[in-house]
Image (cartoon, helix red, strand yellow):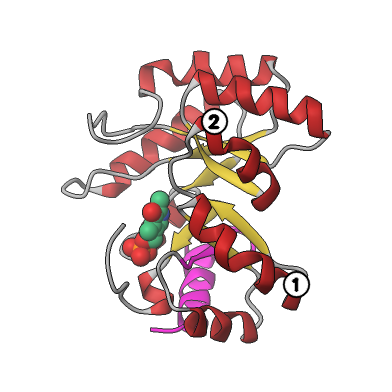
């Protein structure tokens, strides 16, 4: 597949859901991909990328950003508190706000630096032990605490369990967002972004369908 194929499938999914053209942001997930593949997508004009490790992003994005100045990079993987400061410098948005300790660290850094990346609260919709995220039952209270800290929460993010119908999880995430007055929904990957768009995704995170299979999994 290719970037243009994915963007046209997104446009079709927007239209099918009666959503305005361009209402879905495509995050091209470039983790683990060789620099040549990433640069090819930059050359095609795409400017929004996702990475799931601070270290990896720090290695490749400063130079790419210099060459392609409008580029935005979002963190979509788990963040250790001791890397929060570096993440603040590197990323335009962080999709993995998943615990109170990280929220208070962000609030302190925001005060200190005068800026804060756009934030998404990760919700563990499948309540999986091995997965990060706030439990659905605790999401409302957590979002309120983040708002009380003046954090710029744009919306919610989820990664559905691999063996379940993703649309149930997308619908649950959309419901939690709606009742908390949040409009951003980071959901949908290579295999399911169209159903995520049907259920309101504003940010889809697509990796392998754009760049090809990753050489290894993180
Ligand atoms: C790797 C990753 C993606 C992209 O996965 P693909 O199946 O390659 O599209 C999306 N979201 C997260 C959180 C990821 O870690």
Q: Secondary structure at mark 1?
A: helix
**Residue 1: horizontal and vertical position, in percent?**
38, 84
Q: Residues within 10 Å of mark 1 (few under 14, many from 20)?
A: few
Q: N-terminal of the two: label 2 or label 1? A: 1
* In the image, residue 8 lies in the stretch drawn in magenta: yes
Q: Which residue is mark 1?
A: 66
Question: What residue is shown at x 70% (from left), y 47% (from top)?
Answer: 89
The residue closer to the viewer here, 80 or 6, is 80
* In the image, residue 218 lies in the stretch drawn in magenta: no
Whole-number angstrom distance, CA of label 2 to CA of label 1: 38 Å
**Residue 15: horizontal and vertical position, in percent?**
53, 66
Q: Taking the image as drawn, is residue 209 in sight?
A: yes
Above-or-below relation of 179 to 33: above
Q: Is residue 145 left or right of residue 193?
A: right
> Residue 27's image quarter?
bottom right
Q: Taking the image as drawn, is residue 18 in sight?
A: no
Question: What residue is shown at x 57% (from left), y 68% (from top)?
Answer: 60
Span shown in magenta? 1-30
Q: Residue furthest right?
A: 114
Ligand 1: image quarter: bottom left
Above-or-below relation of 150 to 190: above
Q: Residue furthest left?
A: 163
Q: Which residue is mark 2?
A: 178
Q: Is residue 125 left or right of residue 40?
A: left
The residue closer to the viewer here, 214 or 44, is 214
**Residue 56: horizontal and vertical position, in percent?**
49, 60
Q: Quadrant of the C terminus?
A: bottom left
Question: What residue is shown at x 16% (from left), y 48% (from top)?
Answer: 163
Question: What residue is shown at x 67% (from left), y 42% (from top)?
Answer: 88
> Residue 164's image quarter?
top left
The residue closer to the viewer here, 214 or 89, is 89
Q: Residues within 10 Å of mark 2 (few under 14, many from 20)?
A: some
């Amino acid at each position: 597949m290719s970037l243009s194929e994915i963007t046209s499938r997104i446009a079709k999914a927007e239209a099918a859901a009666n959503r305005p053209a361009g209402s879905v942001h495509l995050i091209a997930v470039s983790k683990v991909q060789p620099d040549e593949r990433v640069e090819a997508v930059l050359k095609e004009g795409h400017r929004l990328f996702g990475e799931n490790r601070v270290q990896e992003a720090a290695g490749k994005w400063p130079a790419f950003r210099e060459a392609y100045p409008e580029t935005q990079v979002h963190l979509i993987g788990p963040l250790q508190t001791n890397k929060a400061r570096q993440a603040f410098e590197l990323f335009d948005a962080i999709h993995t706000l998943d615990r109170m300790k990280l929220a208070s660290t962000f609030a302190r850094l925001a005060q200190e630096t005068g800026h804060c990346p756009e934030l998404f609260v990760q919700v563990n919709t499948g309540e999986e032990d091995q997965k990060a995220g706030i439990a659905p039952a605790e999401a409302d209270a957590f979002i309120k605490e983040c708002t009380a800290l003046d954090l710029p929460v744009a919306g919610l993010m989820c990664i559905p369990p691999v063996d379940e119908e993703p649309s149930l999880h997308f619908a649950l995430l959309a419901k939690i967002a709606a009742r908390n007055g949040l409009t951003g929904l980071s959901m949908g990957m290579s295999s399911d972004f169209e159903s995520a768009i049907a259920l309101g995704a504003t940010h889809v995170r697509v990796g392998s369908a754009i760049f090809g299979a990753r050489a290894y999994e993180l």
